[in-house]
Every structure is written in structure tokens, then in C-alpha cells.
Image (cartoon, rainbow, N blue to C red):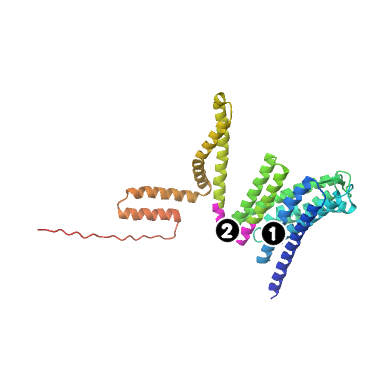
Amino acid sequence: MTSFVNWRSAAALAWAALGFELLVVVVGAIVKAFGPATPFELDTQLVNVFALSIVAFGLLGALIVTRHPENRLGWVFTAIAFVHSLGYLAAVLAGYLVFRGPTPEPAGVMLAWLFIWSANLHYAPSGTFVFLLFPDGHLPSRRWRAVVWLTLASTAGLAVATATLPGPLVVFANVQNPFGVEGPVPLALAGVSFLIAGGCGVASVASLFVRYRRAAGPERQQIKWYLYGGAIASATFVVIIGFGVPLTSATYLVSGATIVIAAAAAVAIFRYHLYDIDLLINRTLVYGLTTGGLALAFFALVVALQTLLRPFTGGSEIAVAGSTLGSVALFQPLRQRAQAGVDRRFYRSRYDAGRTVDDFSVRLRDEVDLEALRAGLLDAVSETMRPTHASLWLRETRNDSRTLGG
């Protein structure tokens, strides 16, 4: 009875936190809609990143706590969303009070300062604990406690450093830090804390690979789902940094990556379509390679055709049209080559099974001996399906022939 009451209390607390977070998002949207204009960076950061991550992580945390209240990961997601919502509320109110008049109001200055340093309270934990505790809410072993304590220490260091850095506050350029401390200490503390937090983040991702090597069955599939979401998020950040994506598009991409991670975690923890991850990874690799190959082929054809046709046409329309048609024609061959390469490199058993079935099909066309056919079919089944035992019974039909004599 006590455990049931505790479970009900935990679920009620998590859903109450989600209700508060959603209320904060709605209130913030109303304040921003009817409030004064704020800097562009503040708008994009609040609307795109904070609001969506609040909903994604808050909902995921509430669902995990309801289904698995003993899993600490649910409380980590709930805490991340709750801290996000407080920062979001502080930023919205600060923007209203700072920019509605010619000079910032004192309450707005304090809220802006609170938002700037409190934002650090979730960066390190969300980049560490969500990997370190996945999927069951426990550390891989006791020695990983050091990573937890270093993460907490670096989080506190980043918060203190940000709270005391002199000069204008980030995204509140017209507000000077009221508690800024002159000297090298805040900047040095921020640098050291950032390095420690980054090292803890790398270690926490490494812990997933440690778990994967030790795991078997469903837990391996759970980790695959999470790593799949993390890979998409990492690729998103690489694209943003490598291609210099504008801030507007970058915030949408970051928000999308956040939702992908939350969705991957939900599928993994609740084990919904758990074993579809292998097919999803396969398709992602195949179509990712195919898309990359088509893009390279398209640009190569454009350059080549423009070079050849420039003396005759003087334009690029024919080159672009020809390159498009050539890319369309290359799609199926490239996809087949990519599929074969992915299967050969990452899905060797599937690749070998396909080769075995193809070889058996070739032999089947020319085989007339029933016993040889039986042996070949059993060999093909054994190589592809790997059963513990296989047998085959074929019924022979005899046609009686009568000779009629006169």
C-alpha cells in the first residue's frame, strides 16, 4: 500500500510540474505577444529552444515517472524541464521590464541577471546525466560517481562565473551585470568549469558504449535507439557549425534535435517498436549515402556540362537540366550499391544470407535430383536462419503406367 501511495504521489508531482511548465510557456507567449520588442537573439532563444525543450523533456519526464517511478532518469528530465521553465519565465519578464521603457527597471535587471546564470544549471546535467543514467536510471558502476560530482561542481562553477562576469549581460546588451567582479577570476573559473563539464559529457557518452558492450537483448536495442537520437543531434550541430547556419534556422534545428533525443529516449525506455531500430539505422545509412552520392554527382555533372556546353549555349540552364536527369537516373543504382555496402559492412549476417539465397536460386533452376534439392534447401536454411534443428520431408508421387497390348 505504501509503495502504491508513493507511486501515486510521484506521478502527481511529475504531472503537476508539467502543468506548471506548460502554464509558464503560455504566460510567456502572452507576455511576448503584447510586450515591447526585444532583441532578435532573445526572441529566437526563448521561443524556439526553451519552449520546445520544456514541453519535450517535461512530457517525457512525466511519462517515465508515471510508468517507472524508480527510474531516476524520469526525474532528471523533469528537473531539466522545470529549470528551463523558470529560466524562460525570468527571461520573458526581464525582457518586458527591461525594454518597455527608455531605461531598464531594477526588477528587470535582477530577472535578467537571474536568467543568465541560472541557464547554466541545466546545460551540464542535461549533457551528462541523461547519458550516464540511461536506460534504467542507475550508474553503470560505482566508479562513475566521480563523473556525477564533477558535473555538479562544474555546473556550480559555470553558474558562479556567469553571475560574476563583469560587463553587459548576454542578450541583454543594455544591462550591466549588477554583481560583476573585476579581474581574471570569473573568466578563469568559467574556462575551467567549461572544460570539466565537456570532459564529463564525453565520459557520459562513453558510458553508453560501456553499457552496450555489457548489455544483451532489449537493453542493447534501447541503447541503439538513444545513440541514434544522439547521432542525429550531433550531426545537426556539425551542420550548424560547419556551414554557418543563420541563427533563425539554427535555433529551429537545435529544437528539432532536442525533440529527436526525447523521442528516441521515449521509444527506448517504453520499448515501443524497440527492434525497429536496426531497420531505421539501415535505412538512414542507405539513404544518407545515396543522398550524398546524388549531391556529389549533381554538382560534378553541372560543372562538367557547363564546361562542355558554354561555347555553344553560353548559359547554365541546359547543364542544370541535364544534371537533374542524370541524378534521377543514378538514384536506383546508387541506392542498390549503398544498400549492398551497408549490409556488407554493418549487417554481415544479412548480406551473407542474401548471397546464400541467391546462390540457391541459381542452383534450383538446374536441379532435377530430389535428394540434392533437399540437401541444398536444408543448407540454405541453416546458413540464413541458423536454426538449432531443421528437417525436410518431401513426398514422392508415383505415376502408375500400364501397357495395353492387343
Residue lying at the far top of the rendered structure: 311
Q: Is residue 250 left or right of residue 364?
A: right
Pointer 2 or 1: first along the chain: 1
Which residue is under mark 1? 142
Which residue is under mark 2? 274
Range covered by the magenta-colored residues: 265-279
Image point (82%, 45%), residue name: 188
User: At numbered mark 1, what does the secondary structure look like: helix, strand or loop?
Assistant: helix
Label of residue 352 in the image: none
Image point (80%, 50%), residue name: 158
Which image quadrant: the N terminus? bottom right
Image height of 400 relative to 184, above or below:
below
Where does residue 226 sit, x and y in percent of width and height? 63, 54
Where does residue 185 sit, x and y in percent of width and height? 85, 46
The verdict on residue 271 being magenta is: yes
Q: Is residue 183 left or right of residue 207?
A: right
Where does residue 10 sit, x and y in percent of width and height? 72, 67
Where does residue 38 sit, x and y in percent of width and height? 81, 48
